Image (tube, rainbow, N blue to C red):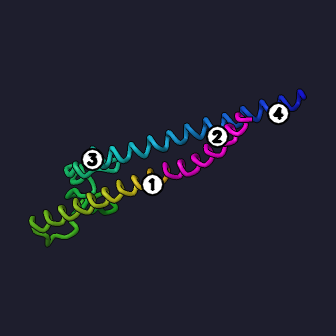
């Protein structure tokens, strides 16, 4: 009798613990998914990959004149890669570079959103059946 009571208590603790953990995971997944939807589609605030509003930083980095049109030899001396480019061609090439970086950043942001949403969806799809199963056992035992 003592052993059966101990087993029953352990079983109840297990059932309630798994149910509580499943509820927490469900809450995290729902809150995370809602955060993505609200942030990206309601308020239009993009994730950490979004550099679209900072073209000057892009121009100062990989799309700078130094990065696009100059190279360095082994001694560290800087030299122009293509001396035949006019100022207009340089501007066009810089603008194209900025556009490519902006497109890449947008793609990275979109992919990050998809990864985050997939993670929250997976959490939900695992936790929800666990919750339903364990809660149904608790309800059956409570009716006895």
Instruction: Please determine whether, in this image, residue 76 is positioned above or below residue 19.
Output: below
Nearest to N terminus: mark 3 or mark 2:
3
Q: Which mark is residue 115?
A: 1
Question: In the image, is 125 to the left or to the right of 13?
Answer: left
CA distance for labels 3 and 2:
38 Å
Asked whether disc 3 touches disc 2, contact meaning CB atoms under 8 Å apart, the reply is no
SS for tag 1?
A: helix
Name the residue nearer the viewer: 4 or 58.
4
For disc 2, the marked residue is 135
Q: Position of residue 141 (x, y in %)?
A: 73, 37
Q: Residue furthest bottom?
A: 84
CA distance for labels 1 and 2:
30 Å
In this rendering, the label closer to the viewer, 4 or 3:
4
Q: Position of residue 23 (x, y in %)?
A: 56, 38
Nearest to N terminus: mark 4 or mark 2:
4
Q: Residues within 10 Å of mark 4 (few under 14, many from 20)?
A: few
Q: Residues within 10 Å of mark 2 (few under 14, many from 20)?
A: some
Q: Position of residue 87 (x, y in %)?
A: 9, 64
In this rendering, the label closer to the viewer, 3 or 2:
2
In this rendering, the label closer to the viewer, 4 or 2:
2
First to last magenta residue range? 120-144
For disc 3, the marked residue is 44
What residue is rendered at 27% in x and 47% in y?
44
CA distance for labels 4 and 2:
18 Å
Name the residue nearer the viewer: 123 or 75.
123
Question: In the image, is 56 to the left or to the right of 104?
Answer: left
Nearest to N terminus: mark 1 or mark 2:
1
Asked whether disc 4 touches disc 2, contact meaning CB atoms under 8 Å apart, the reply is no
Nearest to N terminus: mark 3 or mark 1:
3
For disc 4, the marked residue is 7
């Amino acid at each position: 009798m003592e052993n059966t009571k101990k087993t029953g208590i352990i079983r109840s603790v297990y059932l309630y613990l798994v149910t509580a953990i499943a509820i927490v995971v469900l809450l995290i997944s729902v809150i995370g998914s809602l955060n993505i939807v609200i942030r990206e589609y309601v308020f239009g605030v993009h994730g950490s990959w979004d550099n679209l509003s900072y073209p000057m930083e892009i121009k100062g980095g990989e799309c700078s004149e130094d990065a696009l049109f100059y190279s360095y030899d082994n001694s560290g001396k800087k030299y122009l890669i293509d001396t035949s480019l006019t100022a207009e061609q340089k501007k066009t090439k810089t603008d194209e570079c900025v556009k490519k970086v902006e497109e890449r950043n947008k793609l990275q942001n979109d992919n990050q959103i998809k990864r985050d949403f997939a993670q929250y969806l997976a959490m939900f799809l695992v936790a929800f059946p666990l919750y339903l199963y364990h809660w149904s056992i608790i309800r059956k035992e409570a009716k006895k």
